Amino acid sequence: SAAGTCRIRRWCRGTSAESCMYLPLNSSAPVIDILRGIIVQSGNDASKAIAEHMAGTESAFAEVMNKEAARVGMKNTHFVNATGLPDPAHKASARDLAVLARAIIHDSSEYYPIYAEKEFKFNNIKQGNRNALLYTDPTVDGLKTGHTGEAGYCLTASAKRNGMRLISVVMGAKSMQARADQTRALFNWGFSSFEQAKPQAGGVAVAKPAVRFGKVDVVDVGLAEDLNVIIPKGQAKNLQTTTQLNEDITAPIAKGAVLGKLVVSLGGQTVAEQPLLAMEPVEEAGFFKRLWQRILGWFK
């Protein structure tokens, strides 16, 4: 929990070239401060400390990271350490970093504002956020910089303009300024070329599939929240939605149970998929109704 305390059990610094938040050996610090040390100050010592705090060892934490990467849909990533420092087996694609950024924004919204903090002071040492766009573009509110000799200067960033959020990933830039300039150019192109559309609102019935052996014969299914998609400007009218329902929908059904999915496509290409959920529970029918439905089923 971010409300807990992290014990600094060993000297976590590597080489003098590594960025750090200057955690004192054999000390304790609030987990939320350690998170700020990672996010704002790019502290490798903070990354190693939180790894040991959560998993016991850095290698064990890397395995936790790999499981989480698979869960959120990162398909070309493998972690072997908590810092991202070079290792032949440590890798991540640009697309996967965008997938991770989206997951952080969506699933960890209570912590996401930390990515926009321009500075953090710990142990009487104040350090600034290395994301240069935070100082020049008010629409940028995250996420994370990185640099090694092998990877170059990297920046995964997010910006929100007129209600639409975009994520940019730049890797292998030649300098801090270059990664900022390339990210700015990507955002300017993205916001001028694409728009956000809402092909389906959440909380309303999309379909009413039949229910076997239920006290009621049909159930409303819909989305948990509004479905928004980013598409080329002027293409909203060409969006198509289709429902794909489970073949066997049988009571009892809990509210929120997944009974199918809604597929949004543009020009024959799928642009989004969202699960269709039962909007209310359906109780199992009594014995005689179930028996009657079974008898009818034999004659179909």
Image (cartoon, rainbow, N blue to C red):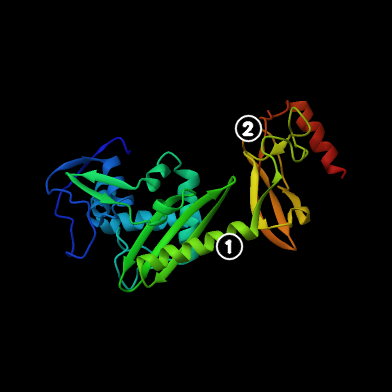
Which element carries disc 1, helix, strand or loop? Answer: helix
Task: Name the amino acid type tagged 1.
Answer: Trp
Look at mark 1 in the image and give the residue it sits on: 189
Residue 162, position as x, y percentages in the image:
59, 46
Horizontal relation, residue 198 to residue 180: left or right: right
Q: Which residue is drawn at 18% across and 51% down?
A: 22
Q: Foreground: 291 or 52?
A: 52
Q: Is residue 76 visible?
A: no
Horizontal relation, residue 181 to residue 239: left or right: left
Residue 231, position as x, y percentages in the image:
67, 57
Q: Which residue is drawn at 26% across and 54% down?
A: 43
Image height check: is 42 above or below 216? below
Residue 16, position as x, y percentages in the image:
17, 64
At label 2, counting other C-alpha atoms closer than 10 Å, the crowd grade (few under 14, some 14-19, many 20 or more) is few
Q: Residue at x 36, y 62 (%)?
A: 79
State which mark lies toward you, 1 or 2: 1
| Picture quarter with the C terminus | top right
Q: In which quarter of the image is residue 148?
A: bottom left
Image height check: is 194 above or below 226? below
Q: Which residue is drawn at 28% across and 59% down?
A: 59
Q: Can residue 153 be seen in this view?
A: yes
Q: Which of marks 1 and 2 is nearer the N terminus?
A: 1
Task: Name the amino acid type tagged 2.
Answer: Lys
Distance from Cα at disc 1 to Cα at disc 2: 42 Å
- Label ID, residue 255: 2
Which element carries disc 2, helix, strand or loop? Answer: loop
Q: Foreground: 145 or 192?
A: 192
- Label ID, residue 80: none
Q: Foreground: 183 or 28?
A: 183
Residue 207, position as x, y percentages in the image:
76, 40
